[in-house]
Image (cartoon, grey):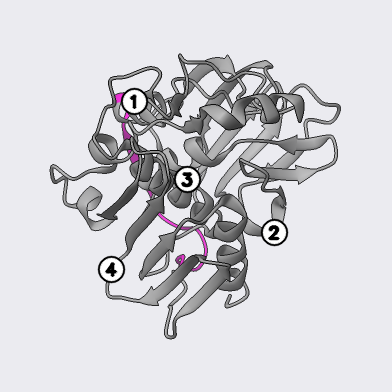
């Protein structure tokens, strides 16, 4: 069975990189339609599918589309939809970037939980997840992301920063926890983890035309002496946020393969390269 929302969701906020305020309406739609964006502010309201072939940029976020017909920083919203089992929705947005909100997927996940889901029967052949029969790995220097054969879907991530407040962190989360309604659900363990940045990189990123909408209200910032805006929601909130990003990027596959996704010091670019490799197995 597929699922869509039981009612519409509307949230507004500022985009992390563009600094532009946008409104997002997430609308229930029919079975087999998938997750897709609609730029309501552009002529002809172009449709941008939330699928691997639509990825157009991966610089500090994931962007879908082409040229002016694009939507940026889709990963947190898509992670919330996919992590909570929403297969089919129309996502209307009146600007170039999905709102960052509080820097996590918490508000998206809470809104989804509040309206609830509706089961749907496929009108065509049932969706079948891609099987991972051999390890698939993408590597750049000491960073990597892999899909390993496994009976269920699990995400494991490691990060390593010189800043003492972050250091070396690992975390693992299973998608099965969501279907079992356990205490280790996406809503409680992954969605609240906020995006984070390093104090010494902020000036460079701003001069590069990025993080125009970033602030201490929507991102954790870490310096040599610790966090500028504590407290953290989890002791290992940074690595949990990396899992959030990975879930969002791999949601572009449609259905998550049964695989153990293992990442270390990876990026949106590496996440998407892995998704592209898996997409080619279709």
Could you tell me which secondary element the residue under label 3 belongs to? Answer: helix
Question: Which circle, 1 or 3, is nearer the viewer?
Answer: 3
| Separation of marks 2 and 3 at Cα, in angstroms | 18 Å
| Separation of marks 1 and 3 at Cα, in angstroms | 24 Å
Query: Relative to the observer, which residue lies in front, 160 or 22?
Result: 160
Query: Relative to the observer, which residue lies in front, 130 or 226?
Result: 226
The spot of residue 109 in percent (x, y) is 36, 31
Crowding around mark 3 (Cα neighbors within 10 Å: few <14, some 14 to 19, many 20+) is many
* Residue matched to label 2: 53
Upstream in sequence: badge 4 or badge 3: 4
* Residue matched to label 1: 115
Query: Relative to the observer, which residue lies in front, 151 or 120?
Result: 151
Number of labels in the image equals 4
Upstream in sequence: badge 2 or badge 3: 2
Residue 84 visible in rendering: no
Confirm whether the magenta stretch covers residue 115. yes
* Residue matched to label 4: 152
Q: Is residue 236 above or below residue 111?
A: below
Question: Which circle, 2 or 3, is nearer the viewer?
Answer: 3
Query: Quadrant where the C terminus lies?
Result: bottom right
| Separation of marks 1 and 2 at Cα, in angstroms | 30 Å
The spot of residue 31 in percent (x, y) is 49, 49
Upstream in sequence: badge 1 or badge 3: 1
* Residue matched to label 3: 245
């Amino acid at each position: 069975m597929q699922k869509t929302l039981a009612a519409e969701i509307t949230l507004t906020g500022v985009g992390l990189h563009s600094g532009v305020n946008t409104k997002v309406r997430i609308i229930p739609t029919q079975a087999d339609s998938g997750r897709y964006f609609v730029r309501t502010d552009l002529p002809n309201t172009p449709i941008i599918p939330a699928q691997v072939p639509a990825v157009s940029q991966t610089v500090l976020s994931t962007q879908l589309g082409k040229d002016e017909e694009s939507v940026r920083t889709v990963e947190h919203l898509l992670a919330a939809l996919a992590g909570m089992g929403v297969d089919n929705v129309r996502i209307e947005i009146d600007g170039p970037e999905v709102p960052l909100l509080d820097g996590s997927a918490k508000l998206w996940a809470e809104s989804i939980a509040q309206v609830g889901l509706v089961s749907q029967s496929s009108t065509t052949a049932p969706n079948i997840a891609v099987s991972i029969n051999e390890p698939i790995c993408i590597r750049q220097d000491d960073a990597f992301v892999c899909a390993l054969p496994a009976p269920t879907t699990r995400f494991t991530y490691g990060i390593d920063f010189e800043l003492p407040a972050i250091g070396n962190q690992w975390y693992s989360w299973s998608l099965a926890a969501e279907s079992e309604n356990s205490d280790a659900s996406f809503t409680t363990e992954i969605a609240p983890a906020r995006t984070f940045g390093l104090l010494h990189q902020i000036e460079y990123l701003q001069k590069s035309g990025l993080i125009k909408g970033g602030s201490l209200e929507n991102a954790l910032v870490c310096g040599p002496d610790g966090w500028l805006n504590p407290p953290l929601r989890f002791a290992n909130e940074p690595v949990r946020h990396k899992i959030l990003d990975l879930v969002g990027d791999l949601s572009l596959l449609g259905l998550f393969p049964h695989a153990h996704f293992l990442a270390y010091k990876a990026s949106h670019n590496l996440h998407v390269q892995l998704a592209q490799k898996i997409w080619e197995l279709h």
